[in-house]
Image: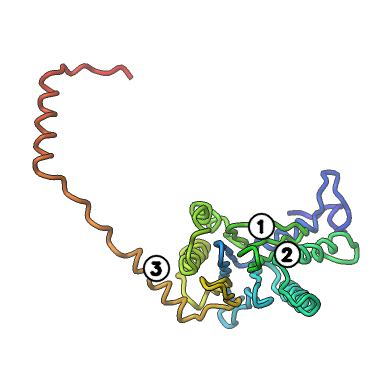
Amino acid sequence: MFRNQYDTDVTTWSPAGRLFQVEYAMEAVKQGSACVGLRSRTHAVLAAANKAASELSSHQRKVFRVADHAGVALAGLTADGRVLSRFLRSECINHAFVYDAPLPVSRLALRLADKAQVCTQRSWKRPYGVGLLVAGLDESGAHLYYNCPSGNYFEYQAFAIGSRSQAAKTFLERRFEGYNDYTPDQLIRDALSAIKETLQGEKLTSSNCTVAIVGRKDDGTVEPFESIDGKKIQEIIDSMEAAEEAPPPPAAAPAAGAGAAESSSMQEEDKGTDAVPMDI
């Protein structure tokens, strides 16, 4: 991207109908570390790749709890993500205080989108340079939303954002049709597999990824949004690698009688037909 006379102000339209500063903010999301979200009817899972700025520093948190029934994963400018996660937490607390009920996930995503949209319509503000995956559970089931810096938001069955997220999207597109009936463990495994696709050869371990889950048990009780322990994540990763390294089962050998019958029939066909070249 190059500077031009239409990108000095977020409220200035280009002749092609574009807001360049909003597009720059969306580009910042693509530069962040990858995040993945997927859901079934009863559970939603968020996963993020942890990447440190250098070997001497720790990584920044990418997954935040918003309420017992919802959480977010972010890609882009982490400082903006922290501000927005605090805003969402405040909205959930206020709604619970007034209505004595959790804030529906769709309305949570809408309020986040409205806050992001204001920054695209004020000349003294800049768009938030972060994209958020909002996962949660309400009376209608599990939900997953993607909130864009432009103020748009979309609901997904599964989605990935951040750097090299296209590889994760390709993996999810091949499998998303069965996610409604997945168990929590199956969702976690697919989330880890999608994150692994974004690492480009780097080994997946519990130290370079974070996984969180929220859902409803079979008895109707809600499992609060929480990050999965690193030890359990490593056990799942080890079992996935063991399954990949296991040799495939041997193919069943054809019966001796069937093989002899096939060979005799082929010999009879060869005798009864003349070899005629085919015009192709």
- Relative image position of residue 23 (x, y in whole percent): 76, 56
As drawn, the label of residue 200 is: none
Q: Kindly identify the amino acid type of the residue bearing the numbered disc 2.
A: Ala
Quadrant of the image containing the N terminus: bottom right
Which residue carries the number 2 mark? 109
Q: Which mark is in front, 2 or 3?
A: 2
Q: Camera-side residue: 90 or 202?
A: 90
- Relative image position of residue 127 (x, y in whole percent): 80, 64
Drawn side of residue 38 relative to residue 2, left or right: left
In contact (CB < 8 Å): disc 1 and disc 2: yes
In contact (CB < 8 Å): disc 2 and disc 3: no
- Relative image position of residue 188 (x, y in whole percent): 49, 68
As drawn, the label of residue 240 is: 3
**Local SS, label 2:** helix
Q: Kindly identify the amino acid type of the residue bearing the numbered disc 3.
A: Met
Which residue carries the number 1 mark? 155
Which residue appears farthest toward the front when viewing the image?
A: 219
Q: CA distance from mark 2 to mark 3?
A: 33 Å
